[in-house]
């Protein structure tokens, strides 16, 4: 994987043309990108081929959550796209995560994509987890539990908020990946996110990879905003 800085830009655009135009206009050559449901459901594998052609590391964020057999067969197909990271919802349980892993191994012609599982969406807060989901455990403890379950089932890491990264690392080991959305540059609107942090804070809290979307894509100067995130990450490197 050609990784400049482990900061994935969320390409939440309605069409492939808009996404490619954005990257081109802002000279974001070869930066890591995340393709989610909005773009993939519109463009399908074609957008992955286009981004690979331009040498972008790709996190394909489709968050599979279904019965093990269906997830296994879907992962075989996704493995053939040869992206770097794919994911499932940890709430699908251990058998589903194992099936996802097996599907990736069966379907990959070359390198097997990393499999990560979503613990608790960063848009959720303590209150929502307790009321909507009727989950009595504290959110951070529940995210840690889902991370441990994911690790036992063969996942390479999890999606979590930066605030849970350190405790998940402590429970699952340093090499277990923590991929953290909910990244906001200082002063950016939180939008629908609840568990947020700046790039510098996320790095300090133990995140391996960051996912940043609207703080960059909706900024007046997206290139400057992305570079600021990169700089925060690198400054923290210098301070360690
Ligand atoms: O818990 C999660 C899992 C995935 N996401 C995705 O990350 C980006 C975040 O975009 P922002 O504009 O920076 O909020 C988005 O594509 C989500 O689908 C997440 O936010 N939280």
Image (cartoon, grey):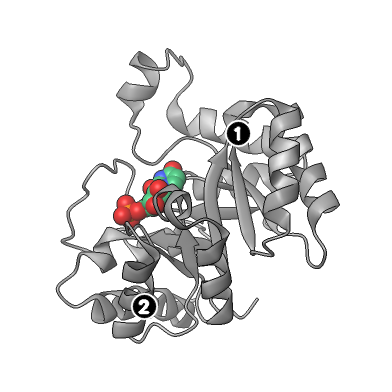
Which residue is identified by label 2?
23
- Mark 2: secondary structure: helix
Instruction: Give how far across and how far down residue 156 sits, in percent.
Output: 70, 51
Q: Name the residue nearer the viewer: 56 or 238.
A: 56
Left or right position of 174 against 203:
right
Which residue is more in the foreground, 23 or 176? Answer: 23
- Classify residue 198 as left or right of residue 69: left
Q: Earlier in the sequence, mark 2 or mark 1?
A: 2
Task: State the image coordinates of residue 99 (x, y, percent, origin top left).
Answer: 78, 36
Rendering coords of residue 36 (x, y %): 45, 52
Classify residue 128 by image quadrant. top left
| Vertical comparison of 199 with 66: above or below | below
Quarter of the picture containing the N terminus is: bottom right
- Tell me the number on the disc at residue 123: none
Q: Residues within 10 Å of mark 2 (few under 14, many from 20)?
A: many
Where 68 sits versus 110, above or below? above
At a point 52% along the width and 30% down the height, the residue shown is: 141
Q: Pointers 2 and 1 in contact (CB under 8 A)?
A: no
Residue at (58%, 75%) from the top-left corner? 52
72 left or right of 139? right
Residue pointed to by mark 1: 90
Residue 197 seen in render: no
Is 58 located above or below residue 132 in the figure? Answer: below
Instruction: Name the element at disc 1.
Output: helix
């Amino acid at each position: 994987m050609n990784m400049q800085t482990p900061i994935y830009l969320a390409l939440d655009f309605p069409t492939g043309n808009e996404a490619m135009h954005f990257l081109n206009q802002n000279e974001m050559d070869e930066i890591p990108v995340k393709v989610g449901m909005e773009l993939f459901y519109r463009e399908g594998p074609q957008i992955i081929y286009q981004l690979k052609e331009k040498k972008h590391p790709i996190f394909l964020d489709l968050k599979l959550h279904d019965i093990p057999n269906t997830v296994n067969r879907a992962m075989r197909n996704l493995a053939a796209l040869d992206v770097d990271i794919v994911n499932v919802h940890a709430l699908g349980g251990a058998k589903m995560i194992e099936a996802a892993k097996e599907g990736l191994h069966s379907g990959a012609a070359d390198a097997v994509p990393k499999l990560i599982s979503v613990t608790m969406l960063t848009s959720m807060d303590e209150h929502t987890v307790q009321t909507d989901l009727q989950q009595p455990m504290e959110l951070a403890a529940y995210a840690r539990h889902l991370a441990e379950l994911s690790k036992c089932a063969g996942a390479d890491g999890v999606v979590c908020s930066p605030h849970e990264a350190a405790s998940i690392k402590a429970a699952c080991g340093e090499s277990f990946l923590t991929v953290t959305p909910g990244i906001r540059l200082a002063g950016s609107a939180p939008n629908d996110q609840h568990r947020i942090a700046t790039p510098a804070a996320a790095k300090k809290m133990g995140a391996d990879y960051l996912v940043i979307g609207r703080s960059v894509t909706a900024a007046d100067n997206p290139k400057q905003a992305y570079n600021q995130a990169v700089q925060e990450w690198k400054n923290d490197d210098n301070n360690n």
